Amino acid sequence: MSAPDTKPSATLSPPATLSDGVVDWMTNGTRDQRFIDNIFAEMCIRLQQAGIPLKRATMHIRIQHPQWLGAGFMWSDGMREAKITRVDFDVVERSEFIGSPINEMMDGATELRERLEGDPSLGRKHAIYDEMRAKGLTDYVVWPLHHTLGKRHFVTFATDRPGGFDDAHVAALKNVLPVLALVSEIRIKNRLARTLLETYVGSHAGELILAGATRRGTGTTVRAAIMICDLRDFTKISDNWPRDDVIDLLNDYFDAMSEPIAKHGGEILKFIGDGLLAIFPLSQADACANLLHAVTEGREAMAALNARNNGTGRAPLNYGIGVHVGDVMYGNIGSMSRLDFTVIGPAVNMASRLEALTKQVGRNVLLSRDFAELVQPKFELERVGKYEVRGFSDSIELFAFPG
């Protein structure tokens, strides 16, 4: 009786493909690359160098963003960087999407290939195919990129090689899909984390949080110009208007005030009902002047909004803005399990009191003397007088910003 064979069975290796070196680079050589569009462009170039006749490639991803449904990266022969296109939420209603390859894939297709050299009347009908034929492309293929929890994104490859991709080219392209899915998911989730933080806490605070500023009680003292804006008669509006109209009104109002703040270097730290809190750190050149430029443009935007609303019979929206300058504590405040990255301190309280005084004084923008001294004589201000401010022992000299 012969002895049993104790030699281990040979492990079958996957067949070699033209893209093995590209896969190795994506696995081991992209750790320090932050952006998926750059990785995608270099991947395409390396696929060409490996002998795959790639002429054009795109990647389509869905993102969680308040303004955009998704993004597309497009690379073509000769490009060192991919072109990035943002995709609107209403794209699914447009002709360029309806019936497109990506539309087919989103409807559940697992692979789509179009031989572009054949009779156009026998192929799929969509403008994108005519455009590719006009550019001399001969073959086009689309595959899903599978991310975790059932999320699907899509990648496309096209060639101008006579006869299109051969079997070895297709095998090589399929070979990169699993690692491209992994590499892209990491970058997309990193971008998602950054986008969500920028959306909910602001760009600067978001950067600090991503850098590790997550411990309760940690923070720094920042000297800043503080701006607090509040909508007038909002309680009356919310009680009498339909809910959806109130939401639309608030969004329009916040757009009018917020976009100039961001444009001029301010950071909105929070929306509080119908109010907002923003700071302009004095570490930035001309921070106080930039705040007033933002106020000026916000006024203009509100005037335009009121003009539009007047056409629908809505009453004009009024607001008050209080502005002060001083040291604030900027950091993590809250409970053990729920933190807010914000600013606190007497300077913030003063800006809030000035905003409340706008109703009493009859001016929609009130500035403290401390702030006014930093912008005069560049800006024409109107001295209003001294007023008692709740919570502060001394009366405060106030200035209005006409306009």
Image (tube, helix red, strand yellow):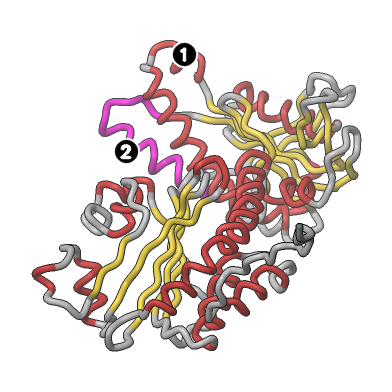
Quick one: 284 or 402, which is closer to the camera? 284
- Inspect the image, locate mark 2, and give the three-letter code of the amino acid beneath it: Arg
* Residue 107 at least partly seen: yes
Q: How many other residues sit within 10 Å of disc 2, few (<14), some (14-19) or many (≥20)?
A: few
Q: Position of residue 396 (x, y in %)?
A: 80, 31
Residue 251 located within the stretch drawn in magenta: no
Residue 301 located within the stretch drawn in magenta: yes
Residue at left 26%, top 69%?
Answer: 114
Instruction: Identify the residue position indicated by label 2 in the image.
Output: 308
Residue 328 in the figure: left or right of residue 46: right
SS at circle 1: helix
SS at circle 2: helix
**Which stretch did the figure color magenta?**
297-316
- Inspect the image, locate mark 1, and give the three-letter code of the amino acid beneath it: Lys
Q: Quadrant of the N terminus?
A: bottom right
Relative height, residue 215 to residue 282 (above, below): above
Q: Position of residue 139 (x, y in %)?
A: 30, 76
Quick one: 94 or 289, which is closer to the camera? 94
Instruction: Identify the residue position indicated by label 1 in the image.
Output: 236
Residue 300 in the figure: left or right of residue 116: right
Residue at left 68%, top 59%?
Answer: 378
Residue 68 in the figure: left or right of residue 189: left
Residue at left 44%, top 37%?
Answer: 252
